[in-house]
Amino acid sequence: MSSPWADLFLLAAKTISFHSGILKKIASLRGLNHRLLAFERIIDPEKLPYPIASNRYITPEHFENLLRWVARHMTVMPLEDLIEARSHNHKINPLTVSLILEGAYLEHYFIALPIIQELKLPVTIFPATAYLGTAEMLWQDKLALALLTCFRSRKKILRDLSEQGLTKDKVDPTRDLLFRLLEKESDNDFYLALDELTEALAQSSPENRFIILGLYGELARNYAELKSDVTFMSWQHLTELSNNHVTIGLSTHTFRPLVELGTDDLPKEIEHTLNTLREHKLYANNSFLPPQGKIQVRFNQAIRDAGVAAILYHQNQQYNLRECVCVPVLHCSEASNFSPRELLEDGWLSRKRGSI
């Protein structure tokens, strides 16, 4: 166990090394991957009508602090320039990053854009085009909203289900999770059970998930009014972002996990995204951000046909396609206890991948 004096000495040495440029030299010698900082939701979770997993959001305060630190200490390069440099094996400042926004949520327009404009930082947004201009929500958010509504009326629901002869001993495993969730006494226990149920549904088939979501949604509507939350920006918002020099990247139309997509589904999803953007006189660059899931060889042809020059991959998605530049993504969220200093020391020097 290290002593306080040793910790203090180590912190002083790291600080001196950084400000003297030694740390940059070390990073250069280590031959690090140049990475992308990705942000999904930028919100205060207390303002949402449903719980959200901590690996899906960063608070506005932390987002602003991180970007201001990055603007002072790192080189922020447009994604297109980074891809071009990587494709030609050009030397790049080892402390170079590019910024991306995933999904095109409302807060990207109202919270991220003003900070990005003030700091004059280049950024690329990857819109979930199926949801723009609609009141639709991702299935995880629909599930959380329905089950939180059920949880608040859990005593009445359990009593009614019991009167109907339904108990957790007489239902299938997925419904068993619902009973276990409704029997929780504290909010913390509920959130843990919700995470377990979300993970279970993520592993199930899309058809089964649709049925279960319908069941929970119907159950919730019997006891309270379900108020959906408009989470995605409008097409007008996206157009304004494009007019303010925010570039648009390519993703799938619905953000469905890759494991759910057949060989014919991925090209259809990509084509749908491109066509929908064209309808609004918007165009995507040649970078592709796949949704969650392992990128498989069977998708190679669809990626080639879309003219993709770069694949941006998340944790456990590492992928190599000779025709493409493959760039790892650091997903910035509240799930990990990170600080701007850790971005430099842990995220870069120890080659960590995934959330920071």
Image (cartoon, grey):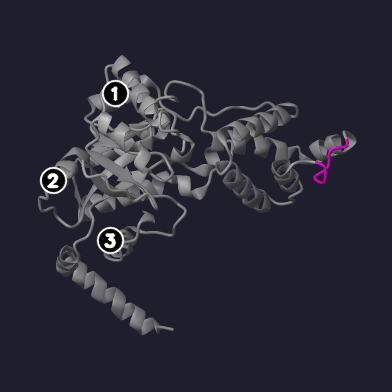
Q: Secondary structure at mark 1?
A: helix
Within the image, what quadrant is residue 82 found in?
top left
Are the residues flagged by discs 2 and 3 in contact, CB closer than 8 Å?
no
- Sequence-wise first label, 1 or 2: 2
Answer whether labels 3 and 1 touch (C-beta < 8 Å). Answer: no
Identify which residue, 168 or 149, lies in the foreground: 168
Q: Which residue is mark 2?
A: 85
Q: How many marks?
A: 3
Residue, x 30% and y 66% (percent of image)?
A: 350
Q: Nearer the viewer, residue 299 or 8?
A: 299
Q: Amino acid at mark 3?
A: Trp
Q: Is residue 233 visible?
A: yes
Magenta-span inclusion, residue 166: yes
Label 2 or label 3, whichever comes before in sequence order: 2
Mark 3 element type: helix
Is residue 145 one of those drawn in magenta? no
Q: Residues within 10 Å of mark 1 (few under 14, many from 20)?
A: few
The vertical placement of 106 against 195, above or below, is above
Hey, what amino acid is under mark 2?
Answer: Ala
Residue at mark 1 to residue at mark 2: CA–CA distance: 28 Å
Pointer 3: what residue? 348
Query: Residue 90 appears at what percent x and percent y?
Result: 10, 50
Left or right of 154: which side holds 86?
left
Residue shown at the point (66%, 38%) measured from the top left: 147
Residue holding disc 1: 240
**Residue bounds of the magenta highlight:** 165-170
Specify the farthest residue to the top.
Answer: 279
